[in-house]
Every structure is written in structure tokens, then in C-alpha cells.
Image (cartoon, rainbow, N blue to C red):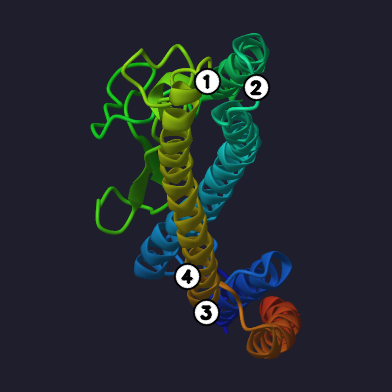
Amino acid sequence: MYINNNAMSGNVANTLTSHYSNLAQSTQRLSTGLRINSAADDAAGLAIRELMRTDIAALQQGVRNANDAISLLQTADGALSIIDEKLVRMKELAEQAATGTYDSTQRLMIESEYQAMASEITRIANATDFNGIHLLNGNLSSSVHDGNAMTSTGKMKIHFGNLNDSAEDYYYIQIEDTTASALGVGNTAGSGSLAYTVSTQAAAQRALVGLNNAVVSKDKIRANLGALQNRLENTISNLTTQSENLQAAESRISDVDVATEMTKFVRNQILTQSAVAMLSQANSMPQMAMQLIG
């Protein structure tokens, strides 16, 4: 028996420290729900998890970006539907002025409404905006995008991927100018335009052809917007699926298996309690030496 050095007590104390550390780790994992709480738990797993988390966050923001773009396209399409109504009315007026049963004075009255409709088309095109971005006045009609300045110019880039690959992470929205002059209707289009005026019978007959061309041009723009909206909806579906799969993969790497960890917790708890009891016994061993001395 030794009094100065209790090797038995030191050995039990080291065992207790180990069991207590394991118990603390199990407690932390069960309380957080995570298998990896620090780099010490799994350095490689932590690195993979953090990369996945950044990708998941970026993809979820990409879904919101794509939804915002759909809202923008719907705003533009709604304004174009109103422009469509104005073009229908203008063609109706041109058809009315093209017949010979009206005199010049009556055609001038028709002309007044005709030009008012053209002015309204321009007003709608200039007034339609989304978050301060004008959609139909030609600002987005350029085929060249420049995002270097504080305000980007040209066609609009819609970014939804988590990197910057032009084939995978973004595409552009380009909307042509739909003002009256761009569509070739009304007196702002220039005297060479077929739909410039309906003030005479001959001019009204030419306007019918010009208005038909304007409707076709407008319909091409709306068809393009519709195709882009469908594409964005498919993109959202793909991004959502990708995000869900990444979340599942991140969970398998990072989250704790509660059933397995609870088994470890109970085991470590019993071992810790046993080590505490044995440490108490080991600490009492030197006292037995007193019996020999006494």
C-alpha cells in the first residue's frame, strides 16, 4: 500500500475523464441535433457541409430571383394586353374611316380618337415598370447587357444558379420597344409609316395594313414573354428539386442519428456513474494503511 501515490485512483480518474468527455459529446449532439458541432468532430465533413449549406442558400435565393422575374414578365404581359386593346380599337377606327360613307369632317373626328389611342399606347409603354425598371420603353431591347455600372443597361440578366456559368446559372430577358412609334402607329411613327393617320380614306386603308403589322409585332413580344415565363417555371422546379436533394445530403453528413447516439449516451452515462463510484472507492484505499499503522 502507498500513501503518497495512489495509482489506482489516478487510473480511475483518467477513465472517468474519458467517459465524461464522451458523455458531454453525446449530450451536445442530442441537444443540437447535429453530429458535427465543430471541426474537431469531423473536419472533412464540416467542410463538405458548409459548402453544401452555401449552395442550398444560393439555390433558394435563386428560386426567389426566378419568381421575381416571373412577376416582372407578368407585369409586362399585363401592360401588353392593354396595348392590345388599344390596337384593336385603332384598327376598328381605321376600318371605319376606310369606307366611303364618311366625309372629311367625320374622318377628322375618327382621327382624333385614333391619335389618342396611339398616345395612350406610348404612355403605357413608358409607364410600365417593375421595381423602377421600365419594361416596354426600349430600355431592355438592346442585345448587349452591361452590369458594370450602378444601373445595368441592355437586356436583363436573371441569375438563379450558385456560380456564374452562362450555360447553367443565368439567362437574359430582352423586351422590344412597344411605344406607338416603335410599333409604327400614330403620328409619332413618322409620315412614312403605314398606320400614321386615318384622316383620309386612302390613309385609313393603308393604316389597316400597318396596324396588322403592329399587332403581329406585339404578339411576337408577348409570345416571347410567355416562353420565358414557362422556362422560368421549369427552372424553379429544377432548383427546388436540387435544393431538396442537397438538403437531404447535408442532413446525412451533419445530422445526428438520434437512436444510435442515445444508445451511446446511456452507455456513457452508466460508465461515468460507475467510474465515479470506483473513484470514491480508490480514494479510500490509502485510508486502509492507517489500520496497519494503528
Q: Position of residue 181 (x, y in %)?
A: 42, 19
- Pointers 1 and 3 in contact (C-beta within 8 Å): no
Lower sequence index among marks 1 and 3: 1
Q: Report the amino acid beneath label 3.
A: Arg
Lower sequence index among marks 1 and 4: 1
The image quadrant where one finds the C terminus is bottom right
Q: Which mark is residue 242?
A: 4
Residue 33 seen in this snapshot: yes
Cα gap from disc 2 to disc 1, whole angstroms: 12 Å
The image quadrant where one finds the N terminus is bottom right
Looking at the image, residue 157 lies above or below residue 104: below
- Pointers 4 and 2 in contact (C-beta within 8 Å): no
Cα gap from disc 4 to disc 3, whole angstroms: 16 Å
Looking at the image, residue 205 lies above or below residue 27: above
Q: Position of residue 42 (x, y in %)?
A: 42, 69
Single out the mark in the foreground, 1 or 4: 1
Q: Which mark is residue 252?
A: 3
Q: Secondary structure at mark 2?
A: loop
Q: Secondary structure at mark 3?
A: helix
Q: Which residue is mark 1?
A: 198
Lower sequence index among marks 3 and 2: 2
Residue density around tag 2, few if under 14, some if 14–19, many if 20 or more, within 10 Å: some
Q: Which residue is mark 2?
A: 102
**Which residue, as the protein is rendered here, is positioned at the far front?**
101
Q: Report the amino acid beneath label 4.
A: Gln
Q: Nearer the viewer, residue 66 or 197?
A: 197
